[in-house]
Amino acid sequence: MGQHYFFKATLDGGRAGYDKNFIYHLGLNTHPCPDMISKNPCGIGIHLARNISRALQYVPDATEFYLATPYKILGSDEEKVRTDSCEILLLTPRDYVEAYRKAVAPTLEAYRKAIASAHKGLIRKCLRDLKKIKEGED
């Protein structure tokens, strides 16, 4: 069975981070013109993140996080779902979010550093191989 509960990150007052005009509220929220044809996770529609860390990637200055369930899923990936409408169930209390951030932040920072280091190492190896190839051409 798939994931049923997601997070919607917003600015103060439920204001959407993408256009600053749409206001999310408890209950049913429907996008005015979702792309119903595309099956891509990105595109026009309501985006719900699989966790708060992912929600912050999409709305870095988010101040509110709502627990939500999507209706018709139009597209999805490992980070989010895109839907035509969703049910906003609960404004997640700020102290829950802060506890989550404190618990996850050190691990995320270590992960980011490990990724950056691995990326640099991979680039360095590729450049070394490229240099060998070019030296062989001379």
Image (tube, rainbow, N blue to C red):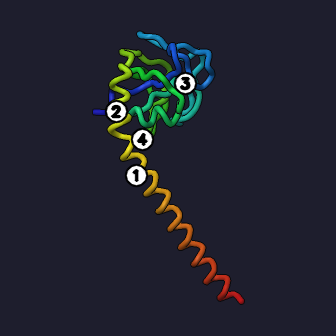
Q: Mark 4 falls on what kind of element?
A: loop
Depth check, front residue: 109 or 53: 109
Tell which circle, 3 or 4, labels the residue nearer the N-terminal end: 3
Residue 72 rendering spot, x and y as whole percentages: 44, 23
Q: Which residue is mark 1?
A: 110
Question: Dot 3, how many residues are within 10 Å of its Cα: few (below 14), some (14-19), or many (20+)?
Answer: many
Q: Horizontal placement of 118 versus 127: left or right?
A: left
Q: Mark 1 falls on what kind of element?
A: helix
Mark 2 and mark 4 residues within 8 Å of each other at the beta carbon: no
Q: Residue at (45%, 31%) from the top-left corner? A: 81
Q: Nearer the viewer, mark 2 or mark 4?
A: 2
At label 3, the amino acid type is Gly
Q: Nearer the viewer, mark 3 or mark 2?
A: 2
Q: Residue at (51%, 67%) from the top-left corner? A: 122
At label 1, the amino acid type is Ala
Q: Is residue 110 above or below residue 85?
A: below
Mark 3 and mark 2 residues within 8 Å of each other at the beta carbon: no
Q: Residue at (56%, 72%) from the top-left corner? A: 126
Mark 3 and mark 4 residues within 8 Å of each other at the beta carbon: no
Tell which circle, 1 or 3, labels the residue nearer the N-terminal end: 3
Mark sitting on residue 100? 2
Tell which circle, 2 or 4, labels the residue nearer the N-terminal end: 4
Q: Mark 2 falls on what kind of element?
A: helix
Depth check, front residue: 119 or 108: 108
Q: Which residue is mark 3?
A: 45
Q: Which residue is mark 4?
A: 78
Q: CA distance from mark 2 to mark 1?
A: 16 Å
Locate the N terminus by quadrant: top left
At label 4, the amino acid type is Glu
Quadrant for residue 106, please give it.
top left
